């Protein structure tokens, strides 16, 4: 009686190696790319870094050391609206960050 055990272990070993290779390939996939690259936009002499994350989500950062005052927030909202040409409908500061995240409505295009 001949045993199929050696052939079985070779097949299992090959399957395990293939599965491991697939797992490693998955780890190397790039993160989701933003809709557009970050850019710097200047309003009233203040530089804002604005970035589109998804079709309806944008983020903006003011200069280093700016506070979360209502004036700073208003400037960040204006920067996002100017960059996106859309109306900001909701915004909030990201946890432990100075970046303002905003949802925009591009059906309500801004008038220049």
Image: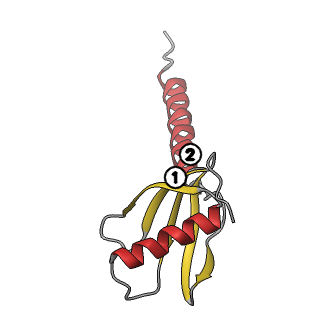
Mark nearer the viewer, 2 or 1: 1
Q: Secondary structure at mark 2?
A: helix
Mark 2 vs 1, N-terminal side:
2
Residue 43: x, y in percent?
58, 82
Q: Is residue 14 above or below residue 64?
A: above
- Residue 97 appears at what percent x and percent y? 35, 72
Q: Residue at x 63, y 45 (%)?
A: 107
In the structure shown, which secondary structural element does the residue marked by tag 1 occupy?
helix
Crowding at mark 1 (Cα within 10 Å: few <14, some 14-19, many 20+)? few
- Which sits in the foreground, 24 or 31? 31
Q: In the rendered picture of this protein, how many numbered marks are placed on residues?
A: 2
25 or 76, nearer to the observer? 76
Q: Residue 12: which disc?
A: none
Q: Which mark is residue 21?
A: 2
Most extreme residue toward the top is 1
Residue 27 tag number:
1
The quadrant of the rendering that contains the C terminus is: bottom right
Image coordinates of residue 108 in percent, x first then y, are: 61, 49
Which residue ends up furthest to the left in the rendered image?
96
Residue drawn at 39 percent across, 78 percent down: 71
In the orientation shown, which residue stands out farthest toward the right? Answer: 112
Q: Nearer the viewer, residue 30 or 39?
A: 39
Q: Whole-percent x and y of residue 85? A: 65, 60
In this picture, residue 61 sits left or right of residue 18: left
Q: How far is disc 2 from disc 1 in space, using C-alphas?
A: 10 Å
Tell me: residue 44, above or below residue 71.
below
Task: Tell me: 48 left or right of 84.
Answer: left
Relative to residue 4, is residue 111 drawn left or right?
A: right
Q: Residue at coordinates 42% horizontally, 87% vertically from top-left?
A: 64
Mark 2 crowdedness (10 Å alpha carbons): few <14, some 14-19, many ≥20: few
When asked about the image quadrant of residue 68, the answer is bottom left
């Amino acid at each position: 009686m001949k045993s199929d055990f050696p052939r079985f272990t070779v097949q299992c070993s090959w399957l395990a190696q293939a599965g491991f290779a697939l797992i490693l390939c998955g780890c190397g996939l790039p993160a989701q790319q933003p809709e557009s690259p970050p850019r710097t936009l200047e309003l009233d002499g203040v530089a804002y870094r604005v970035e589109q994350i998804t079709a309806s989500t944008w983020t903006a950062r003011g200069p280093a050391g700016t506070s979360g005052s209502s004036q700073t927030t208003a400037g960040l909202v204006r920067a996002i609206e100017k960059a996106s040409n859309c109306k900001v409908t909701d915004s909030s500061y990201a946890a432990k960050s100075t970046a303002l995240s905003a949802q925009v409505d591009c059906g309500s295009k801004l008038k220049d």
